[in-house]
Image (cartoon, rainbow, N blue to C red):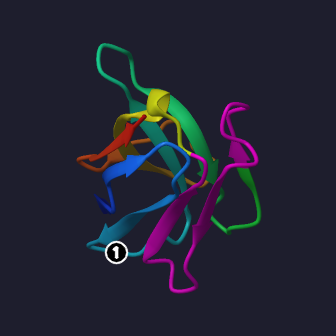
Amino acid sequence: QVQLVESGGGLVQAGDSLILSCAASGRTFSNYDIGWFRQAPGKERGFVGAISWDGGSAWYVPSVKGRFTIFRDSADKSVFLQMNSLTPEETAVYYCAARGAGQPTYAYWGQGTQVTVSS
């Protein structure tokens, strides 16, 4: 079982950049796809993007494509979400989650990190 710990959230201004980290605890992220999700106040949690277990593929929702980048470190202990040109509408709690390679469901979740974008 893998445990996930997010960090890097904070208060930024519109147009700023921020990098979120998702660190593995207990074991590495090898053989796990890692996804990023976010939940804005009063809204359901939604998918942002993900990276495959081998780092060979990444995919994003259209609203963040070209601005957000997900990458993983070579030791497979951390996954990062680089966010550029943030907007106030992207204020949310950001979560990372893991699913075994080939599995349909993200079974392991972090506790989330707050990102607040001021106008």
> Between residues 6 and 68, which one lies in front from this camera angle?
68
Q: The N terminus is located in which quarter?
A: bottom left
Q: Amino acid at mark 1?
A: Arg
The residue sitting at the bottom extreme is: 75
Q: Residues within 10 Å of mark 1 (few under 14, many from 20)?
A: few
Within the image, what quadrant is residue 92 found in? top left
Residue 77 x, y percent position in the rendering: 43, 77
Residue 6 in view: yes
Q: Residue at x 60, y 55 (%)?
A: 101
Residue 1 in view: no
Residue 7 x, y percent position in the rendering: 30, 62
**Which residues are drawn in magenta?**
59-85
Task: In the rendered view, tell whether residue 44 sits above or below residue 17.
Answer: above
Mark 1: which secondary structure? loop
Residue picked out by circle 1: 27
Q: Residue at x 50, y 65 (%)?
A: 80
Q: Residue at x 50, y 78 (%)?
A: 76
Q: Residue at x 68, y 33 (%)?
A: 61
Task: In the rendered view, tell whether residue 12 sits above or below residue 21.
Answer: above
Residue 74 x, y percent position in the rendering: 58, 85
Residue 81 x, y percent position in the rendering: 52, 58
13 inside magenta stretch: no
Q: The C terminus is located in which quarter?
A: top left
Would you say 67 lies left or right of 72 here? right
> Between residues 86 and 43, which one lies in front from this camera angle?
86
